[in-house]
Amino acid sequence: MQSSLLLDSYCLNENYSFNSCTLCITQCEQNALVFNDSSLNLIEEKCTLCAECIGICPTENISLDTFDINSFVSDFCENDSNTICDKKSLPSLAMLDSYHLISIVLRKRENIFLEHTNSISNKAFEFIEDSIEKANYLLHSMGNQNSIFIKTVEDKYPTIEALRTKNLEKENSNTPYKLSFMNDSLKIGCEDFNSTVLTIDNKETFFNKTICNDSCENCQDCVNNCPTNALYTNEAKNEIHFISGKCIGCNNCINNCSKDAISSVDSIDLIEFAFNQSRLEVSFSRN
């Protein structure tokens, strides 16, 4: 059965005028992904089905119809292996991002090894190396002693066509599955945290925002342009709440705010994050 690369309807660049995300386009060495007529398009004759564009997408807009990365991660967390092999265990290591890697380590409670041959592309290697660095930093900041390692092996692995996995049913949620899965993983490991407050730079895996009540005019643009409902209002629409555990760091809220009332916060509460606890950011008196 021939695999196909699927494009869903969650593209940030397609759906939000203030967002110019081109992560997948930049990641593709075959120039098979292009943005034309306000939409992301696949040039099928150029696509090699390498799957190296999948992990980098923050909204999980891209997938393979024959290999579901979230299903693979979920199953891997339950088996006895501690090694993931590029093009043997999965089509590409670049299908994994820091969300996946953190979840795996927290659930398996051991060191994890990623193996690849010299055939891995430069962009795929750079992406997975960056994801490992982010994951290890955050894991160690929590007090977790385990790490993710990457190494080159000489064995030639089977072809991608030999790999198949089931597809998880998509939940009725705007939050990417890999983020929800990591939140659940943090709940499992929270008893082992040395500290529940982490320093972050909002360019990594965890993101945190705040709204200045004095500057905000309650126009709701930030809420209306949040793809994951990390920002939402109460029924009366006189309060804006924020859930850090749903934020993917797209910065739609910051880019859309004409009053510059929204900014990033350089720390995050892991318990608040893991349990999707909401935080009241601004409140307005009833008219």
Image: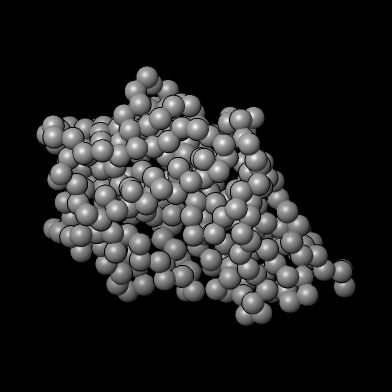
**Can you say whether 189 is above or below 32 in the image?**
above
Which residue appears at 63% of the width and 36% of the height? 194
In this picture, residue 132 sits left or right of residue 84: right
Figure quadrant of residue 73: top left
Q: Is residue 77 visible?
A: yes
Q: Quadrant of the C terminus?
A: bottom right
Counting from the top left corner in percent of width and height, residue 48 is at: 16, 51
Which residue appears at 18% of the width and 60% of the height? 30
Q: Nearer the viewer, residue 261 or 47?
A: 261
Which residue appears at 18% of the width and 35% of the height? 153
In this picture, residue 15 sits left or right of residue 40: right
Q: Nearer the viewer, residue 262 or 10?
A: 262
- Which residue in the rendered view is the most extreme toward the top? 80
Which residue appears at 33% of the width and 48% of the height? 129
Counting from the top left corner in percent of width and height, residue 117 is at: 17, 40
Figure quadrant of residue 259: bottom right
**Can you say whether 154 is above or below 39 in the image?**
above
Q: Nearer the viewer, residue 7 or 265?
A: 265
Q: Is residue 62 visible?
A: no
Figure quadrant of residue 276: top right
Counting from the top left corner in percent of width and height, residue 81 is at: 34, 23
Q: Quadrant of the N terminus?
A: top left
Counting from the top left corner in percent of width and height, residue 135 is at: 45, 44
